[in-house]
Image: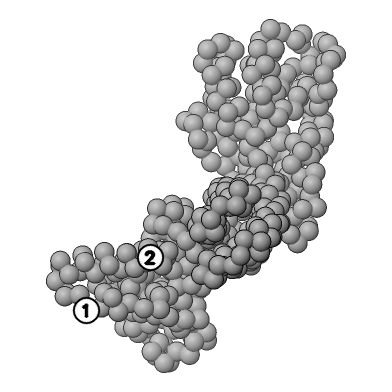
Amino acid sequence: MNYYGFKKRTEYMHCPPSVKGRARKIALEMAWARALGRFPFSDLMKETIAAIATAPGNGGVGMIRISGPEGISVLETLWEGEVRPTSFESRRIYVGRIAFDQVLAFVMKAPSSYTGEDVVEIQAHGGRRGLELLLETLLKAGAGRLRMANPGEFTQRAFVNGRIDLAQAEAVADLISASSEQAVTLAGRQLEGRLSEYVGKLRNEIKVMRAQMEAMIDFPEDEDVQGLRYEEVLERLQSLETRIRSLLTTYEEGRYLREGIRVALVGKPNVGKSSLFNALLNDDRSIVHSTPGTTRDTVEEVLDFSGLSVRFIDTAGIREGRDAIEGEGIQRSQRKIDQSDLILFIFDVSRPWEEADERIRTLTTARRTVLVANKSDLPPAFDPLFPAVRVSAKTGQGLAELKEAIRRPYLGRESRVQDPGVTLSNLRHRVALEKGLEALDCVAEGAREKRSLEMLAADLSLAMNRLGEITGEVTNDEILGEIFSKFCIGK
Ligand code: GDP
């Protein structure tokens, strides 16, 4: 294995170092990478990169991470301390000064580091401005040798250098963004390699089957024996397909656990949507964060409901006014409904049920909906004929029941996460498995029709490639770009 994790690169080593030659070299690198089904890297990968790895804001400690061959020598030029960085032992902590700050630094030498390259980590005081100045100082000292890292570039290098596979790289991002306990558990398992291992086993079975078919192609035998083998192929395919299907059934729950659920509050004006939104927020001390919604007129708040992350979408702060039940208001409700997994349909139980309530309620019928009778602290004007959770945003009555009603349909099957099985939670993985399944279906059909082994083997290869996309054994630039661009800088 060389620096890129490839076994051979003699094919492009003799290119002339002209600009034309350089372009040719990169083109060859890419072709070579594609042939191997690996990430088409470029010279960018050889550069040393640096970034602040800790979160924005002031903290006790802040960390700067550097990865690449020049890291140690850049540190050497700035380091004031007893031991010189060039003679730092790998994974030992040293105290020193860099410019204005007293810091701790350590190196992890290639290949035993997160990225598989030489990594330098500097722990400094955690003021944001101080860290930025320290990073600038390092970049200046390393001008021409050191540059700012792109989002996810450290993890991308870890993947390209074979330290982790693609599903694990995705788990790193999931773990960072996890906003509930269940999401953390799920990402932790994927990072450990459970999904990769499971998919790897399935893929290996397909590989063995294909190898056997190829052997039969090379050494054909009489028809009887082949007939029997078709049956055997079918049996093995069925076992594979059953396992893939069962893995696919975990997706829905996995997605809810990983991403949480999106909940919209809808109802006509003045029924208490904003009050309820605030009551739920205030009642819960585990507010994770608040972000602008996907449309300009919404805000989102994420709460952890005993392990399930619940993202409330609201038009908080925006007065819906009288038009809320006409045109614009209906459209706004529809948008919220379209963006959500669950709808809280709120009505005012202290006032008669109106045409407008009915109109908004009919919008929600296509979705999972919880009906909420608000203002239960007041004398009721009617008795709902449908099951509704009685609450009062004003007194807080019924909030616990409401939370349970939101959570129950999603975490009713909690056992799956407790059980050490594998859970699918990423759409990309689901699509790859579905395509793999399709290819296996083709093989099964071919086997039933006793088509040529060459054809079956080709479909088996396709199925193998599909499963290989999950762990990144087979991938392309576009997928990788998309995955790593979602990371934060410094990871
Ligand atoms: P929205 O237009 O649906 O967002 O409704 P608001 O949250 O602005 O509430 C409308 C009015 O109803 C306000 O005056 C609230 O104080 C009042 N309100 C909301 N919830 C309750 C409740 O549970 N009980 C009572 N008595 N009043 C409420």
**Residue 7 at x, y percent in the picture:** 40, 78
Tell me, yes or no, whether the two marked residues, 1 and 2, touch with CB atoms within 8 Å: no
**Residue 112 at x, y percent in the picture:** 50, 81
Q: Between residues 91 and 463, which one lies in front from this camera angle? A: 463
Tell me: 225 left or right of 41.
right
**In the figure, 78 relative to 292: above or below?**
below
Crowd tier of the residue under label 2, counting other residues whose Cα lies within 10 Å: few below 14, some 14–19, many 20 or above: few
Q: Residue at x 38, y 65 (%)?
A: 35
Q: Which residue is mark 2?
A: 35
Question: Is residue 231 shown to the viewer in this render?
Answer: yes
**In the figure, 191 relative to 291: above or below?**
below
Crowd tier of the residue under label 1, counting other residues whose Cα lies within 10 Å: few below 14, some 14–19, many 20 or above: few
**In the figure, 403 relative to 162: above or below?**
above
**Residue 38 at x, y percent in the picture:** 42, 65
Q: Residue at x 83, y 11 (%)?
A: 382
Tell me: 140 left or right of 51.
left
Marker disc for residue 210: none
- Helix, strand, or loop for circle 2? helix
- Helix, strand, or loop for circle 1? loop
In the picture, the quarter occupied by the N terminus is bottom left
Q: Specify whether tag 1 is near ligand 1 (CB below 8 Å).
A: no
Marker disc for residue 14: 1
**Residue 211 at x, y percent in the picture:** 56, 68
**In the figure, 347 relative to 443: above or below?**
above
